[in-house]
Amino acid sequence: MNKFLFLFLVIPVFGWSQNFNYTKIEELDKTRYENKDYYEVKNYTKKKLKKKEVKNIIFLIGDGMGVSQVYAGLVANRGNLYLRTMPVSGFNKTNASDNLITDSAAGATAFSIGEKTHNGAIGVDKNDVPKKTILELAEENGMSTGLVATSGITHATPASFIAHQPERGMYEEIALDFLNTDIDVFIGGARNHFNKRKDGRNLLMELEVKGYDVVESMDSLKYAKGEKVAALVAEDQPDPYLHGRGEMLKEASEFAIKKLKKNKNGFFLMIEGSQIDWGGHDNHVPYIVTEMMDFDRTIGEVLKFAAKDGETLVVVTADHETGGFSVTGGDIAAGIVEGKFTGGSHTAVMVPIFAYGPKAELFSGIIENTDIFYKFKEALGL
């Protein structure tokens, strides 16, 4: 997510993210974080997989997650992450069609349609022509599909898998695109783009007519029993982990997997750790580290499922790096991270990619971000 959008998130005068307590974040030392919340990492991936065919794909995107963001999380968790247990790794090149530095829209669209596009584009090529996304192709082949994010569900990364708009800021148009698909589960914020619209439509009611269980909080998610679920759990943006979001990402991902795995044809699920990026824009080490570890704990739950299932390909990467973040000091034994930044925007550096499961070897080496789309198609035999 770009610097422009982040400014909307941090300046209350614009009315965004009203649930955030910015004073709390600003009271922290932005250059240093000492982790008091160490968690144990279990190596689920040591289990030898017997099946070689892919039935399901779980694609996890750490928005703004470069190598330093990963390493900061590893240091803070005293030398270990679930990411470290994934046996295949490489890098993806992130440039957009019109700029060496991508935004989240062009970066995620490259993943979803297999083409480089201009910054700001959602599910369209560089000429603004809509293209079928990997999620839509999965639907056409009888698979279940889902999206989970710690941002608004209409924000650039999740939107790029389901919507087709020339500009990422067309939030109400993006929300309408959700009604034009058969996506089974989506969980995130931005309820206001569905029920407080300029056109007067209440898309929450329209989703119910389409057969969705519509819920408006994580607490009520467990009561959603329908085959299709639309969980818009924040009016605007979910809180940062530092402000008490809790285990939303892990719990939402577990819920989505439980729903989607019922399909004998398999499923495609995209999960975004959205706010790693926002910490980078704010040059805020504690924000980055806590979001990174939250994302990694979710990866752990996904790997636990995939190891037991045996037919699930798990791929983890980023759309770009944010902030030019560098780990400049700290202490692994004490979980202390110190860092500095080159700026508040995205950078052009390659970002890491990790894979586990059948066909994981497709994701090693240095690849283009667009290659991920084609490797997913190959893995699924589409």
Image (tube, rainbow, N blue to C red):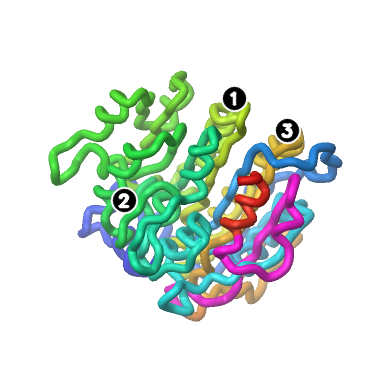
Q: Residue at x 31, y 61 (%)?
A: 166
The residue that label 3 is drawn on is 309
The residue that label 2 is drawn on is 17
Residue 333 quadrant: bottom right
Residue 55 versus residue 123 in the image, above or below: above
Magenta range is 343-371
Alpha-carbon distance for marks 2 and 1?
Answer: 35 Å
- In the rendered structure, which disc, 2 or 3, sits on the residue that comes first in sequence? 2
Residue 327 rendering spot, x and y as whole percentages: 63, 72
Residue 241 rendering spot, x and y as whole percentages: 49, 48
Compared across the picture, whether 27 is left or right of 206 comes to: right
**Could you say whether the residue bearing mark 1 is in a helix, strand or loop?**
loop
Inspect the image, locate mark 2, and give the three-letter code of the amino acid beneath it. Ser
Q: Residue at x 44, y 20 (%)?
A: 226
Residue 94 versus residue 201 in the image, above or below: below
Q: Is residue 2 visible?
A: yes
- In the rendered structure, which disc, 1 or 3, sits on the residue that comes first in sequence? 1
**Disc 1 + disc 3, Cβ < 8 Å:** no
Q: Is residue 23 visible?
A: no
Compared across the picture, whether 47 is left or right of 37 comes to: right
Q: Residue at x 60, y 46 (%)?
A: 382
Residue 262's label in the rendered image is: 1
Inspect the image, locate mark 3, and give the three-letter code of the amino acid beneath it. Asp
Q: Magenta span has 216?
A: no
- In the rendered structure, which disc, 2 or 1, sits on the residue that comes first in sequence? 2
Count residues near mark 2 (Cα–Cα under 10 Å), then give few for <14, some for 14-19, many for 20+.
many
**Could you say whether the residue bearing mark 2 is in a helix, strand or loop?**
loop
Count residues near mark 1 (Cα–Cα under 10 Å), then give few for <14, some for 14-19, many for 20+.
few
**Disc 2 + disc 3, Cβ < 8 Å:** no
Residue 340 quadrant: bottom right
